[in-house]
Structure formats: C-alpha cells, structure tokens
Amino acid sequence: MSARSQRETMTVNLIDNNLLPPLASAFLEGTGTELLAPVRFQAPGAPPPTVSALVGDRRELSKGLTVANRGYAHPAAEELGRKLADPATLVVITGQQPGLFGGPLYGLSKAVAAVRWAERLERDGQPAVALFWIATEDHDFKESSRAAFFTPAGPRAFDLGADLAPLRPMGLRQLGPEVDRVLAELREAIPGEQFAGWIEELGQWYQPENDFGSAFADLMVHLLGERAPLLVDSLLPELKQAQAPWMKRLVVERHRVAETAAERDSAIEAAGFSLQVRPQPGASPLFLLHEGERRRIEWLGEDRLKLRGTPEVVRDVDWLLETLEQEPEIVSPGVLARSAIQDAVFGTGLQVLGPGELAYLPQVAPLYSLLEIGPPAIALRPQALVLEEHVAKKMEAAGLTLSELVDPDLEIDDHLAGSAGEEFLDPARRQLEALLAGLEAPALELDPGLAGPWRKTGEQMKRALDSFSGRIKGASARRDQMARQRLETLRDTVRPMNQLQERVISTAHYPGKYGRGFSEAMLEQLDEQDPITLQVVRP
C-alpha cells in the first residue's frame, strides 16, 4: 500500500463522520461563531491569541499554586509560578474532573494540548504558561469513580462502588478502602510483570486516605514530568479568595445575569441549535457547601435565596454577600459561570475545551461583557486514538479503513459476508423484475385499479428477497467465527464499549502497557492545532 493510500486509510475527519456535536462542527466550519461573542473561536490555522488587556495581579495566586505544585512533586513548580505572576505571560488553560486513575484519556489529551500551545507561543516570542484546572468542587461521583481498561477478555470497567456521600465535592472525599480492591482487581485482570509494576506505582498515589484531587495531580505530574502544566485545585484557598469579588458581582448583578442568559439562549435556539444546559427558573450559577453537600443557590423574589433540596434554608442575599467576604471557600461557580470566573482571575488568553464544553460556552459568553472580563480565545482540543502498528496492519488485512471502524453503525456481518449469495440472488432479482414487468400490462388492461396492488406486490416481493439476502450474508459471516472475532477485537480497540477510545479507556491503562514512552509519544505526536482529524498516536 502506498504512503498516500495509507494516510487515507488511517484518516478520520471528525466532522464528515458526524463525531462532533453540531455547534463544534459549525464553529470549525466558520459558522455560528457570533454565538460565542465576545469570546473568539480559535479556528485551525488562525493567528494565535495575545495577552488580555485585563490581566489582574496574579502574584498571591501564583504563590499558592507554586506551593501546591511543589507538593505534587512538580519539577518546574517554581518556574511556572514565576511565569504566572508576570502580567506579560499569556495563560493557556484547560481542565477536567479528577477521575479515578487520571480519568479517560481525553483528560491527558487536554493537558498535552495546553502544554503544546504554551510551548508554541513561547517559540513565537510570547511568554506563556499552561494551567490545568482540576475541578475538585464538582460532585459527580459516578463519573469520577470509574475507570475502564483493556484486558485480555476485552474492555472492562472498574469502579469504587456506591456513592456514600452524594453532593460532596470530589476534592473533599477520600478514595476510601475500595481503591485497594480496584487495584487488586486490575492486577488480577491484566497479567504481566510490567503492568503489575505499574499497579504498584499507582498505589503510591491512589491510597485510601488520599483525596481524588491530589491523587489526580500526582499522577499527572508523574506522566508529564517537567512539561506538566501548572495544576490548579479549584479548592485552593488563594484561588477562592481571588474568585470572591467576581462571585459577588454575580450576586449583585443577578437580575441582569438572568436577562442576558435568556437573550443568549433564545439566540442559540433561533440559530437552530439545542441548549446544552436547559434554563431553570430562579436557579443561580452558584453553589454553596452546606453540611458537606454542594447545593445550588436559587433566588427567591428580589432579595432572598434558598438552597435546592433544603427548603428550611432560606436567607437574605446580603447574607450570601457576607459569606463571600468571610468564607469564600464554601461558594463555587457552576458550569454556566466557572469559565468566566476562571478567566477573570487568571486573565486567560486561550482556553482549550472539549466538544461538550464548547457546546455550552455560548451560554456562558454573555458574562464576559456583563462582568467586564477580558474574553479569551477558545480552541477545540485535539482528539486522540492510540493505535499500534500491528493493529493498523490487521485493519488493512481486513479491508477496513479507520473511518469504517469508528463508525458506530458498522455491521460486521455485512463486511464479512461481502457479496455472499449474489451469484444466485442476482439472477433471481432479474427474473423477478421481468416477471413483474410482464404482469403490469395485462393486469391494468383487465382493471386499471390494479395499478396500486401490482406496485405493492412488487415491493413486498423485493423486500422479502432483500431479507433473504441478509440472512444469507449472516450465515456466511457466521461460518468463519475466527474472522468475526478478529474484527470485533479491532472494533473494540478503536471503539470500546461503543464509544471513541479516548472517551472510555483510562489514562492509566497506557503507561501500564507502554511505559513512560507513552507520555512522550503523546507530547510529541499530538497536534494541538488540529481538532478536525482523529489523531492516531503510535506508542
């Protein structure tokens, strides 16, 4: 196979293959970007962003982050902290929940993309620093407490069991004794000395007494070393202090926030797109930590509020403003405010987002003008697929392209059967068509009203023959079970659990199989400026 045909076989255009949400596809094709205003979409190949003119004083924040990252054993903590403190430095930021064992691979893809963006800007003469926001205030235990790995028996999910503390932020939760059970299950499910050694390493960070956020940060630093981004725990006290003035403004401007949100929601729907977050009457974009549970704040009338799920907790708005002054650590922004608050405190120049995050950003964007926050540029992250050379050769031998293999509608039986049965079904089809054609004239001569029944009879006979053809293909495919198993294994490699690989398989799976060379492959091979092509990483 020629080099050109190999590229075509392994190339997957995410837009053409309907593997991106409608808004992400539209933005990449240059339409609908006005829905992001005043935020600018970073189109592939467009000039890089410049430092926001509204960068505030980041010195105290950088000190806190330096200390925290030193605690994660980040070898470049001091250097990155100094860069962040300098107002001339452009901030490139991305983030994710602190998933078990690093979460799905796309979390690492985000970190690598942010690092590569910052390094590219630095090569162009623009001082830049990459940050990774660890969303420890989030409380989605189901998402954060499971991890999937490839095992000899196929893709398998492991989890920490039932949620014993719903609504408790992940950064305030210990991993608990269940993490030892999961490590033991992994050790048993995936044989080999290399993987067993990796499980022992994971156990250094994923211990029952450790919290989700610190374990995630420790693993990220281990994987990326001195090129790791500066890691931002969203519960960091210095960060909560920096956020407080902006969250106060959300409270003071709550009526205007609701009005502008409604206007933008209407514009999004008028443009033909669905809202990623449905509006909820009275719901604020803020949460409050109450008795260990993160509960949404809801407005009552002009100057009162309550906490969702706790009807007995009713307060004045002034009480919330005082709380933000004295205890900002118990108030947190929700999904429709976090990006704006984050960019306000860091003076972000570029956000790197996933397709789902990009889909709700149009609903966040009005806050930048309303709160007078310098709007960043927004780049869609690259999407990665880890694929060994021998797997690519098996695809070629099976006559499949990568586009076909990632297609959720791929019918393995049809592919295996090919044209099975056509040598005797084709003549039958031709005979049927001739027979039907010969019946038309005499039937209509007898009664013109027979035109409809004649047509329906023909359609029924053709459908029956097509159904029989499908059964022949299925029988042909089942005849060679080994070939079928090979194809199913290939499909499970690129689309495990019927999802794209990076959205399912744990970050921790890959260094367990490939060693430290895997992180190097991600850092060197992932193209941060290409969010349109599914990027094949060869470990």
Image (cartoon, rainbow, N blue to C red):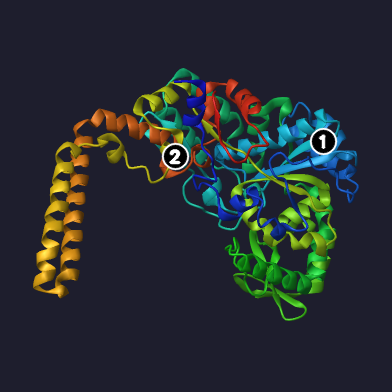
Amino acid residing under circle 1: Ala
The residue lying at 84 percent from left, 44 percent from top is 61
Outermost residue, top side: 193
Label 1 secondary element: strand
Tell me the tag on residue 42. none
**x 55%, y 46%: residue:** 15
Which label sits in the foreground, 1 or 2? 2
Q: Which of 509 and 423 is in front in this view?
A: 423
* Residue 196 appears in view: no
Residue 166: x percent and y percent? Answer: 56, 57
Is residue 90 shown above or below 461? above
Query: 192 or 313: nearer the eye?
Result: 192
The image position of residue 527, as x and y in percent, is: 65, 32
Give above or below for 248 relative to 111: below
**Residue 387, how many percent across, how many down?**
49, 28
Q: Is mark 2 on a helix, strand or loop?
A: helix
Q: Measure the alpha-carbon separation of dots 1 and 2.
A: 36 Å
Q: In which quarter of the image is residue 253?
A: bottom right
Asked whether residue 86 appears in the rendered view, the answer is yes
Q: Which mark is residue 406?
A: 2
Above or below, 172 against 495 in this view is below
Tag 2: residue type?
Val
**Of 503 and 230, which appears nearest the observer?**
503
Earlier along the polypeptide chain: callout 1 or callout 2?
Answer: 1
Quadrant of the image occupied by residue 112: top right
Q: Locate residue 399 relative to residue 304 in the image: left or right.
A: left
Which residue is pictured at 69% across the width and 55% down the height?
A: 33
Residue 128, disc? 1
